[in-house]
Amino acid sequence: MADPMRIRAQMAGDKANVRVLMSHEMETGQRRDSAGKTIPAWFIQEVTATHNGKQVMRAEWGTPVSKNPFLQFFVKGAKAGDKIAVTWVDNKGEKRTDEATVS
Amino acid sequence: MKTNRREMLAQSATVMGLLATAGLLPQAAHAAWTKAAFEAKSVADAIKALGGNASTESKDITLTGPDIAENGAVVPVGCSTNLPGVKRMAIVVEKNPSVLAAVFDVSDAVDANFSTRVKMGQSSNVYAVAMMGDGRVLFSGKEIKVTLGGCGG
């Protein structure tokens, strides 16, 4: 299982500023190892976010996203105490969900 | 019931096999991932694969990012717009091996304002692309200079 994400959701005006730091290699499939063999691509393909269980954001990612990706977005109509959950799925089918409370 | 590790592994393998045959594994979900767009080699191809037509430059779309990135492996970029009716926003790096970095589906519940970090192989134009609900495709971009490429070993 991959390492947990670090999610911070803070109110900024009437929106929640959600910042997520995921732990993932994000291998592009372009690099070669010391033996000259291509390292297969391994990256997060899909990221979804829910606000109190309702999906608010979906993103598709490609290999150009950096290693240990950072993501920031703003959820409208959120208030302190709400739950924001983020899920990612990588191209190997591995997935991880983490949740944070808006503060 | 006591299950040792070996039996446990064997069982989970069986379960995984069943799930796979039933098509319940996440691969099914991946069909939604627009492969063609992420394999596109040019900005125009990527937009086309996402279902957009001719794009026009617009001042209402903002791409945020540094003028000079010291490390191409981690370039902070963001795309945002205040226009209503945005369906999707994308971040595109013109000179990367795969130009499309990320696509965000905009819903009523989130702002059309996303930030992330991308890899850049070399100095290149980076575009924020907004696909509007009425079919228009708007973009704006800036050149980000990279001192150290992020795609090499």
Image (tube, coloured by chain):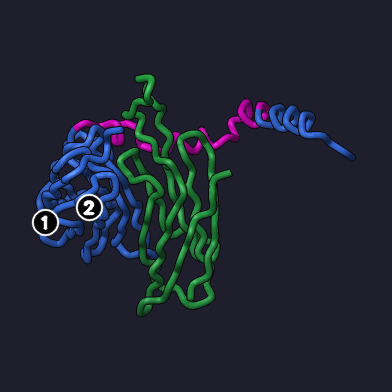
Chain colours: A green, B blue
Nearest the viewer among B111 and B13 is: B13
Which chain letter goes with mark 1? B
Q: Amino acid at mark 2?
A: Ala
Q: Quarter-wise, where is residue B25 in the image?
A: top right
Q: CA distance from mark 2 to mark 1?
A: 10 Å
Secondary structure type for disc 1? loop
* Mark 1 surroundings: few (<14), some (14-19) or many (≥20) residues within 10 A: some
Nearest the viewer among B121 and B30 is: B121
Q: Amino acid at mark 1?
A: Ser
Q: Quarter-wise, where is residue A75 in the image?
A: bottom left
Can residue B11 be seen in this snapshot? yes
Nearest the viewer among B52 and B3 is: B3
State the quadrant of the N terminus of chain B. Answer: top right
Identify whether A18 is placed above or below B14.
below
Residue at point 31% right, 46% down? Answer: B102
Q: Earlier in the sequence, mark 2 or mark 1?
A: 1
Q: Which residue, as the protein is rendered here, is positioned at the far right?
A: B1
Badge 2 is on which residue?
A: B130
Instruction: Judge from the rendering whether residue A39 lies leftward or rightward of residue B90; answer left or right.
Output: right
Identify whether B91 is placed above or below B23.
below
Q: Are marks 2 and 1 in contact (CB under 8 Å)?
A: yes
Boundaries of the magenta span: B17-41
- The disc label shown at residue B58, or none: 1
Residue at point 33% right, 51% down? Answer: B104
- The percent position of residue B88, horizontal first and vertical second, equals 29, 51
- The percent position of residue B89, horizontal first and vertical second, equals 27, 52
Which chain letter goes with mark 2? B
Residue at point 14% right, 49% down? Answer: B144
